[in-house]
Image (spheres, rainbow, N blue to C red):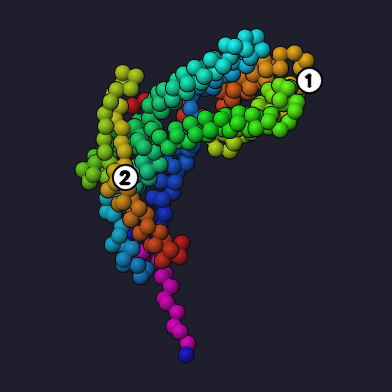
Amino acid sequence: MTRRSAPVPQSNDISLVDAPAALDQLDPLLQHRGRLGALVLLSGADALSFSRLKSLLDETDGNLGAQLRKLEEAEYVSVKKEFVDRKPTTWYSLTDCGQRALRRHLKAIESLLRASNL
Amino acid sequence: MTDVTQLRQDLQFVRGAVARRGHPGPGPASIYFLWAGYVLIGYTLIDFARAASGWFFLIGGITGGVLSWQLGKRWAMRIGECDMALAWRSLLHWAGGIVLAVIAMIALSAVILPLRQQAYGGQILVVLIGMVYFLAGVHFDRNFLWLGPLLMAGGVLVGLVPRYGWTAPGAVIALGLVLAALVPARGRQHSQPPSE
């Protein structure tokens, strides 16, 4: 008895790949690369300032501010404002909720990439 | 609909950001100057005012530790990156390494007669601290990868100095720390704080 092999996807479109569970696990909020980048960077430190995130992500003030506000509203990051060398500095930290969301999202990406043979 | 190509581009973007962050590095150069001064003064005191050296090492060591912590914290604030795990790792490396080096020297002096007679003690200590330097190179600052072996070689060579057996090793360690502070290392690439 011969086993029939699974059909090979002909496109880069993930929807052709049989990985519905992984797709469900993708966090819509983290499908923006700026927000994903911010969370990944925050996962490697206790806190990063707005200016540090801006220089690392190479984003404009307005764009980064808007993305971080969305993460803050979802309670993925916490915000603290203080003066450093008499200059106002905004610090961002990853919350437990953000940590869990990031882990789930990265796991889903990994499953999708594996399913698409990348 | 999620496109794999888009996903891959996003991941490359994130990877680029993480690569730009690099390694936060060992901290500001001022910490290195501080400890260079501490070592030079302390070791010189052993040769010229032995009674005062013990107090100097005790009080200076504690003060230097607190000052280093404050300088490191201030530096982290300025570059906009707070990483307590790295701070603790640095503290454990240097404090633990120096304590282990001193314990090893004391243990060696218990079994080796010339050490008990206070000969070669400075040399042994410098060689052991050279190993601590080398491990700092592995973990924090690439400069120490060459400074460590250089210090170990220096520790052996100071045995040729006929007088001031402690001042000479102290000068070698201090010189090593000053060099580590002055030579730009891959680990110290974020010395300029970004503007907000």
Q: Which of A115 and B3 is in front in this view?
A: A115
Residue B112: x %, y % from top left: 73, 31
Q: In this view, does B74 lie to the left or right of A96?
A: right
Tell me the chain of label 1: B
Callout 2 amino acid: Arg
Residue B167 in sight: yes
What residue occupies the far left of the structure in this picture? A73
Q: Which of A108 and B55 is in front in this view?
A: B55
Q: Give the range drawn in magenta.
A: A2-16
Tell me the number on the disc at residue B160. 1
Callout 1 secondary element: helix
The residue positioned 38% from the left and 62% from the top of the image is A112
Between the C-alphas of marks 1 and 2, the distance is 61 Å
Tell me the number on the disc at residue A35. 2
The residue positioned 27% from the left and 48% from the top of the image is A97
Image quarter of the N terminus of chain B? bottom left
The verdict on residue A12 being magenta is yes
Callout 1 amino acid: Leu
The residue positioned 66% from the left and 26% from the top of the image is B126
Badge 1 density bin: few <14, some 14–19, many ≥20, Cα 10 Å: few
The verdict on residue A63 being magenta is no
Residue A27: x %, y % from top left: 28, 54
Q: Nearer the viewer, residue B26 or B183?
A: B26
Eye-nearest disc, 1 or 2: 1
The residue positioned 40% from the left and 26% from the top of the image is B73
Residue B133: x %, y % from top left: 60, 31
Please say if the residues under marks 1 and 2 sit with CB atoms less than 8 Å apart.
Answer: no
Residue A34 in sight: no
